[in-house]
Amino acid sequence: MVHPISIPPDAEGPSTGEPPTGESAAPGWRRARVTPSLAEVHRSIPVNGTTWFRKLLAFSGPGYLVAVGYMDPGNWATSLAGGSRFGYTLLSVILLSNLMAVLLQGLSSKLGIVTGRDLAQACRDHYSRPVSLFLWVLCEIAIAACDLAEVIGTAIALNLLFGIPLTWGICITALDVMLILFLQHRGFRMLEALVIVLIATIGACFLFEIFISRPDMAGVAAGFLPTTQILRDREMLYIGIGILGATVMPHNLYLHSSIVQTRRYEETAHGKREAVKFAFLDSTIALSTALFINAAILIVAAATFHSSGNTEVAEIQDAYKLLTPLLGVSGASTIFALALLASGQNSTLTATLAGQIVMEGFLNLRLRPWVRRLITRAIAIVPAVIVASLYGDSGTAKLLIFSQVILSLQLSFAVFPLVRFTSDRVKMGEFVNPRWLKVSAYSVAFVIAILNAWLLVQTFAGWMS
């Protein structure tokens, strides 16, 4: 069941555990380069396009796998709450979160392309073993929390669409392991294609919702402009930080640094420079789609609920029940639930890959994909089933929010190593972050850390009161 990765004798250095020296050590790292991340698909996709557009198409795909983490069910509750309570005001927070995501995902793809290491391998090859194990545990907890949100979101969608009880819906989500195994055998491009189709489904659903909800376009435009009101209003700031915490996902940084290496770019300075450029374009375009969907959720909530005085709508089930009556359009609620189902299924695909990458990278250990998937899904299903059985809809809604708190707690432990590695000239060579980018990246890292710490304090204070 467990298959240790084969490593050259000199890759791990002397048996004493000391960093290797001489030619066996890679510049700036404690160990020489190890087996590639996701070895079964590593450099499996050619990028031999003759034109700029064809090369962009060849590199397109990883960004969309990353983007689904920015529109998963965990984002829905915060965007619904923000739109229903404060109208369009918090659109500026969604825009800011997306800009932060573009920066961090760009750094993640650059790390993978330049060093040949994903973020998990980079942490293992830089930090001591105890530190690496600590980071691995935190990351596994974050992936389980992310999977928990996807399980709950998919179960809620199945309940709304087909009347399946939440407990049974949660159990049904375990079956998606068969879909993932099928796609893995069909090639990485097939997985990317499915993800893009699901994203397009979500986008089309919310385009329809925006059309029938007829939002105030002047209000929408004003909402994208930052205002000091967000800082002055305690409740608005709380939800705004929740949107930020639910948007930037830690496992996406590990995922992106690995899957960009599925492209067969030239491993020269010119080839890597070109790969970094096209990978950045890919993720920026994909994250723009995520920005539209997250903004659309808030806009629909603002136009439908806030404008009608329903300012306390924060749960997905409540939004589903109210959409059709308030909009007066048959099928509005069904389209909303269909988008939720596509969102949950999309996110679960990428969480599986992230789990495999993290385990291989930190532990140099491989499990069969179906074993890894069942372990991750079981960790998410057990608490979800218990809560759904005992507390029903309200309990699962609170568990959904709790999963986002856990993700917020882990985020800085992925962001700071990423910024540190890409700002290290010894590790990155000519691709090191320039001064302006280094300042920007560390500023984003500290802002995320401070805001997420504030969110955690306020969340736990609210639970204790």
Image (cartoon, rainbow, N blue to C red):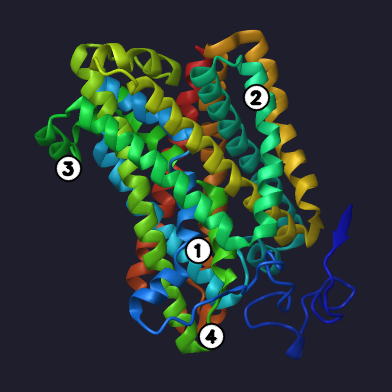
Residue that appears at 33% across and 32% down: 297
Inter-mark Cα distance, 3 to 4: 42 Å
**Element type at mark 1:** helix
> Which of the 4 image quadrants contains residue 13?
bottom right
Query: Is the Cβ of the residue at disc 4 closer than 8 Å to that at disc 1?
Result: no
Note whether residue 453 is visible.
yes
Disc 3 is placed on an element classified as loop
Q: Mark 3 points at which residue?
A: 225
Look at 47% across and 17% down and name the residue there. Answer: 462
Q: Where is residue 330 in the image (x, y as percent from the top left)?
A: 30, 18
Percent x, y of residue 308: 20, 13
Q: What residue type is labelled 3?
A: Leu
Q: Is 353 left, or right, of 433 in this rendering? A: right
Residue placed under numbered mark 2 in the picture: 170
Query: How far, Cα to Cα, is label 3 from label 2?
Result: 39 Å
Q: Tell which of 108 and 201 is nearer to you.
A: 201
**Residue 175 in the image: above or below residue 35:** above
Measure how far apart labels 1 and 2 are at the Cα level: 32 Å
- Give the mark nearer the N terminus: 3 vs 2: 2
Q: Earlier in the sequence, mark 4 or mark 1?
A: 1
Residue at label 4? 266
Along the viewing direction, whichever of 346 and 131 lies nearer the viewer: 346
Q: List x then y, in percent, for residue 316.
A: 43, 21
Residue 277 seen by the camera: no
Q: Distance between the residues labelled 4 and 1?
A: 19 Å
Callout 4 touching callout 2 (CB < 8 Å): no
Q: Which of marks 4 and 2 is nearer the N terminus?
A: 2
Secondary structure beneath dot 4 equals loop
**Which one is in front, 119 or 293?**
293
Tag 1 residue: 108
Q: Quadrant of residue 302?
A: top left
